[in-house]
Image (tube, rainbow, N blue to C red):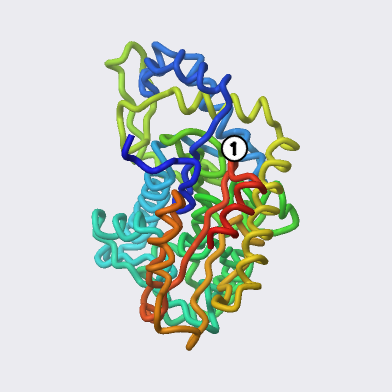
Amino acid sequence: MLDGNARLNLATFVGTWMDEHADRLYAESFDKNMIDKDEYPRTAAIETNCWLMLADLWHAPSADGAIGTSTTGSSEACMLGGLAFKRNWQNARRAAGKSTDKPNLVMSSAVQVCWEKFCNYWDVEARYVPITDEHKVLDGYELEKYVDENTIGVVAILGVTYTGMYEPVQQIAAKLDEIQEKTGLDIPLHVDGASGAMIAPFIQPDLVWDFRLERVHSISTSGHKYGGVYPGVGWVVWREEKWLPEDLVFKVSYLGGEMPTFALNFSRPGAQIILQYYLFLRDGFEGYREIQQNNQDVALFLSSGIAKLPAFELWNDGSDIPVFAWQLKPGHTKNWNLYHLSDRLRMKGWLVPAYPMPDNLTDLTVQRIVVRNGLSMDLAAELLADI
């Protein structure tokens, strides 16, 4: 009872609402353990159908030639993408008779913490490209200074957690093409599409960021963010089976039949996978397009309202994913800051976080709103009035 109201939580990217049919379906599938594919073959088939749909949505050359899996969230999906990068790099280096010491991964300083965890847990050097006022996202600028023969891959974020902005994946891929021409280094891309991979295909279909780019080997997303499901499901898909090393796949026979598994978790709920399939079937492409367009409309309404207030300057406006951030206009006042505003909004029930930006911009504090399905125009107008 003392928790915040989940619908008024504008800090989280994670879904806080599903319809009553989904609630009932969830209750009817609490007992499904996703790992028991022999005991629950229909749930296993549903999982496969979901990642095949995503492979097709993300323009894999052939969905049947791709490979994917569900995970407990996009963080685990990112870990699997990173592990595939590391193992492919190690195998190639061994085949060439070279050292496999000191692998590194290149990414923006604004990456989600799961990438820091990946590098820490799996002994990979994290090379952060700092964001600046001139380069608000990783855009390929001076990328050649960060990559070398020990680089296992580059991470591009489709929807930066701090601000919601897209990193220009096509531009980063073009820069890596240039680097390969000059140095011979063939460095793959993983797209962390935790949010954007479930938005761009529907409302920015002309944006080239996915498997249309040959350099993109894998894409991860979160089913429980803009996929619309309650917490507990993510997805990762590889462009072609060859990019998932066979030695990362385990075959287990003690559940009743020999089954391949390549998730980090073993037992995990199958209910959210069934809910994901439910949404894919119920809403379809056009339904998702309408939902995400509505989210973006609400985000643009809010950001334009905040831009009109003399106290604030927008960092971005929510025209990528429906997430935007703003800062206090320099010199506006010394009487209060964004932390005070966040505290006052909490008194009204709203959770609107304020936080410092990452390295090189740590003296800059921003405030961010995440617009999800369930934040209506009426609620948005109430929020603006409260601000």
Label 1's element? helix
- Which residue is more in the foreground, 367 or 236? 367
**From the viewer's perspective, is residue 2 above or below residue 125?**
above
In percent of width and height, residue 291 lies at 68, 41
Report the residue marked by disc 1. 65
Q: Name which residue lies at 47% across and 35% down.
A: 69
Q: Quadrant of the N terminus?
A: top left
Q: Name which residue lies at 57% across and 46% down.
A: 372
Name the residue type under label 1. Answer: Gly
Image label count: 1
* Residue 225 visible in image: yes
In percent of width and height, residue 49 lies at 58, 27
Q: Residue furthest bottom?
A: 331
Q: Name which residue lies at 56% across and 66% down.
A: 167
Q: Name which residue lies at 71% across and 55% down.
A: 204
Q: Is residue 328 left or right of residue 149?
A: right
* Residue 60 visible in image: no
- Which residue is more in the foreground, 128 or 211? 128
Q: Is residue 161 left or right of residue 253?
A: right
In percent of width and height, residue 183 lies at 49, 78
